């Protein structure tokens, strides 16, 4: 998907909400376990109920890999359902891949070509030859892990030798701009690290940022918008558990829609 199509959708819906499909059989409503494919049944209900308020969906691949072949079938059915019924929706494979070049090339084909996601999250630790194979795909995006929302992020990502040196995440972002097809890059910056968004925007003033951590992880949407919004919006703010597991009863999709609408209305204020 071209960026201008994503921006058009954001403006139309007055939303930059991404919903994470972290589908766990231990957390979904029990009545769905009677379905032939409970993972897909849950995802379909959530998508149908919330697509009015969301511009993007982000299946976390670990939640599908955990169930083996059945999980992969549910993932493929989910992305096919999105691409067929809601082609305007921006899709992200939250796979966090990254390996030597020929392996990364296979990962890229799996998610960006075969499954036809619009974007994939990628770990940058192995450097440019592990990332550039993902960047070769036209109108697809590679979302580089820069500054994540987990508590252990500060073990490495904010490290610098002294106060005058760039933090590691800043060096990663700066270096990535030199890679081939770097215009296809986006970056992950956690909502719980919103105080660092100023520094990120000094390096990549116009790039889209995927911002997890609003909702269950306690990140502030106000702070994210204050420091992260650009003239072209430049944000996809993700909420997963805070939306999809709002209810464990048969009204789960309705409750998810209500929570998504609540976030959408808040986002509309900042647009």
Image: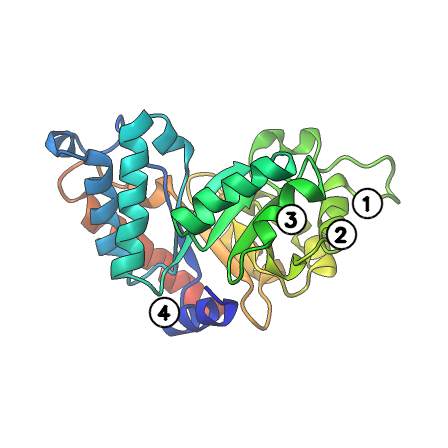
Label 1: which residue? 166
Label 2: which residue? 174
Q: Residue at x 28, y 36 (%)?
A: 73
Quick one: label 2, few (<14), some, or many (20+) residues within 10 Å? Answer: some
Quick one: label 3, few (<14), some, or many (20+) residues within 10 Å? Answer: many
Label 3: which residue? 132
Of circles 4 and 3, the one toward us is: 3
Give the image location of residue 138, x and y in percent: 53, 61
Q: Are marks 1 and 2 in contact (CB under 8 Å)?
A: yes
Q: Is residue 255 above or below residue 127?
A: below
Q: Give the mark count.
A: 4
Separation (CA) of disc 1 from disc 4 = 37 Å
Q: Nearer the viewer, residue 132 or 216?
A: 132
Give the image location of residue 62, x and y in percent: 41, 31
Work out whether mark 1 precedes mark 2 in sequence or the reverse, and give the earlier one: 1
Work out whether mark 3 precedes mark 2 in sequence or the reverse, and give the earlier one: 3
Give the image location of residue 204, x and y in percent: 69, 60
Helix, strand or loop status at disc 4: helix
Label 4: which residue? 13
Q: Are marks 4 and 2 in contact (CB under 8 Å)?
A: no
Q: Are marks 1 and 4 in contact (CB under 8 Å)?
A: no
Helix, strand or loop status at disc 1: loop
Q: Is residue 238 above or below residue 266?
A: above
Work out whether mark 4 precedes mark 2 in sequence or the reverse, and give the earlier one: 4
Work out whether mark 1 precedes mark 4 in sequence or the reverse, and give the earlier one: 4
Work out whether mark 4 precedes mark 3 in sequence or the reverse, and give the earlier one: 4
């Amino acid at each position: 998907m071209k960026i201008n199509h994503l921006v058009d959708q954001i403006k139309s819906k007055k939303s930059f909400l991404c919903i994470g499909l972290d589908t766990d059989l231990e957390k979904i409503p029990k009545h769905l376990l009677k379905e032939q494919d409970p993972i897909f049944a849950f995802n379909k209900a959530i998508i149908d109920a919330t697509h009015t308020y969301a511009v993007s969906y982000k299946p976390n691949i670990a939640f599908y890999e955990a169930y083996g072949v059945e999980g992969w079938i549910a993932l493929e059915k989910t992305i096919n359902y999105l691409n067929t019924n809601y082609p305007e929706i921006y899709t992200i494979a939250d796979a966090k891949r990254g390996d030597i070049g020929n392996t990364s090339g296979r990962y890229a084909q799996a998610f960006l070509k075969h499954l036809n996601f619009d974007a994939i999250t990628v770990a940058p630790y192995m450097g440019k030859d592990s990332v550039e194979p993902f960047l070769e795909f036209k109108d697809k995006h590679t979302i580089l892990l820069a500054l994540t929302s987990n508590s252990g992020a500060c073990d490495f990502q904010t490290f610098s030798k002294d106060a005058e040196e760039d933090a590691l995440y800043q060096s990663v972002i700066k270096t990535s701009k030199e890679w081939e097809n770097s215009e296809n890059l986006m970056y992950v910056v956690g909502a719980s690290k919103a105080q660092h968004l100023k520094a990120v925007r000094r390096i990549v003033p116009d790039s889209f940022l995927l911002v997890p951590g609003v909702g269950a992880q306690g990140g502030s949407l106000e702070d994210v918008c204050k420091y992260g919004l650009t003239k072209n919006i430049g944000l996809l703010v993700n909420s997963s558990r805070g939306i999809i597991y709002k209810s464990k009863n048969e009204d789960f999709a309705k409750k998810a829609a209500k929570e998504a609408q609540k976030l959408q209305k808040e986002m509309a204020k900042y647009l």
